[in-house]
Image: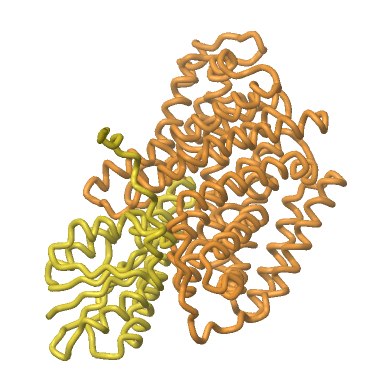
Amino acid sequence: MWSVIDSGRRRCKGGGMVSPAAELLAVVALLAILGFAITRPRGLPEAVVAVPAAVVVVLAGAIRTERLVAELSSLLPVVAFLAAVLVISELCGAAGLFRYAGSAMARASRGSPRRMLLLVFGVSAATTAVLSLDATVVLLTPVVFATASRVGVRPRPHVYATTHLANAGSLLLPVSNLTNLLAVAMLGIGFLQFAGYMVLPWLVVLAVEYAAFRWYFAGDLRLGAPPVAGEPAPDSPPWFVVAVVAAALVGFVAASAVGLDPAWVAAGGAVILAARALWRREARPGELLRAANLPFLGFVLSLGVVVAAVVDNGLAVAMAAIVPAGTGWLDLLAWAGLAAVLANLVNNLPAALVLLPLAVTAGTPAALAVLIGVNVGPNLTYVGSLATLLWRRIVRAHDHDAPLGEFTALGVLATPVAIIAATTALWAVTSLMGA
Amino acid sequence: MRIGIWLTEGAWPAAVDAAAEWQDDASEVVLLHVAGGGAAEVVGGAYGGLWGRGRRRDPAASLAAEAGTASTELLERAAARLGRPCQLRSLGGRPERAVTAAADALDLLVVARDGDLSRLGPRSLGPETRFVVDHAPCRVLLVWPGTAPGLGSIPPPPAGPPEPDRR
């Protein structure tokens, strides 16, 4: 295998090695990872194929050693950050933060579905921004469903809103989405700087989504609920975890200002919350390890290595012909559109890994436009991509329980408008701030 | 007579109150509610779109459990409002199909309007309610939650052909 790949090597213009055999191997490895992640046979973790595939790519020499080292050293802090945030959000859930948010929403909505929707938007956007989209999908949606049911309003608009905002609300902070962490690692910009660029696009996306939900679910949002006797007053919020999360946010800003990787701050927050939960016997060590989701971290690292091999061995040259060069309004729209299309064909994680390195060379605004595409774009379908949707239709051809038409119509209504509006806002901000 | 009452969030008290007027001692009453309404599937799909997380934390299962509990609670509140013995049925699947199928064993299905309640007209039925009203294989009693809007909420008829010249 070594000799085959070495004999095919030639030097390309940029000085890197390009080999058809290496590219073929990397592409086959990538397709195996993507195929496994889409089909998830027997519910096995995606890392089961991703890690061996990356090992094969490395052993076969399809990625240069210095590139491998660079890729791993840029991905490891990202993955560590992610693990810490997963643990923090899990412990927020264990401490009752989302239960508290649910009972506070139930009280404040006073039986009005429209007030409830506004509260769900606020809580979902805040949860996604601060604790990442995983927390919103995994921990918040069941609470929102239970809250809407308890209040007596139709749960559907509120549950849909929560899943939409897990994607659409993930533009604000680096920690909101894994894709943002990847971009920040490549761009080398600070926590506050990222938020400064993205706050307006984030608000614009929220406004577009809110308008779309109010219009689309006008009927469902009209019928108020009769008052429920005995709605208990909410307990006080779990102040300790709130304080730790707030301190971590301040710490992220401070750390990036002094050049310390914010992953250390996240790790510190996770350790404090974990120590307290273990001391109070609210969590067991095994649960914390499972919350950190090591197979997920292995999957991200492996996918990053394999995508780097695919990009280096020829995809970068091929893509250079189609990606926009500048950072004008139309260029940014093209970056965001390309990212949304790629994310919708397969998934937003490989889309981000492929496009971000190219966009970073075009400039910070281009990389941020790619984030708008890969973060907001997956709302076009309720499963994040056409490949996954197609697969679910194939294996569950006789399952008509999901109101897919409804959700897809909502995605088609809101997503393109949200991407265009947010990219326009990003263009305005980056032009003014002189990125 | 076998009377079914379809309970939907927000509109169910009107349906229960209307059924109370129509039932007699010999009536057999069934309360129907569809749990979840596809929410678990959508949440499961959204989680499936997050790659690499494994299956263990899929929130669809806990959401389906919440949906079952919420459905039972709503049925019990409605039974308390009805104030007489009745059968409680929590259904699964697509609401319009599940309720239409359940209506096959009924003599009368009580349905509350759940769309635009500000004016008389076809939009006062949501899409699922519309389907049930159109397809139910039994008599249907359709009720307004609260007071029905006045006749003035119907738009004027479209301009017809010009009056024939009488001269």
**Could you tell me residue A395's position as x and y percent?**
27, 45
**How many marks do you count on the picture?**
0
Q: Which residue is located at x 26 percent, y 51 percent?
A: A400
Letter of the yellow chain? B
Quarter of the rendering occupied by the C terminus of chain A: top right
Please indicate, yes or no, whether residue A361 appears anywhere in the rendered image. yes
Q: Which chain is orange?
A: A
Q: Residue at x 81, y 50 (%)?
A: A253
Give the percent coordinates (x, y) of residue A375: 57, 41
Q: Is residue A328 left or right of residue A139?
A: right
On the image, the x and y values in percent for residue A20 come to 48, 14
Residue found at x 65% / y 26%: A332
Image quarter for residue A204?
top right
Residue at the spot x=69%, y=47% of the render?
A172
Residue A69 visible? The answer is no
Pick whichever, A299 or A375, lies toward us: A375
Left or right, A189 with respect to A5, comes to right
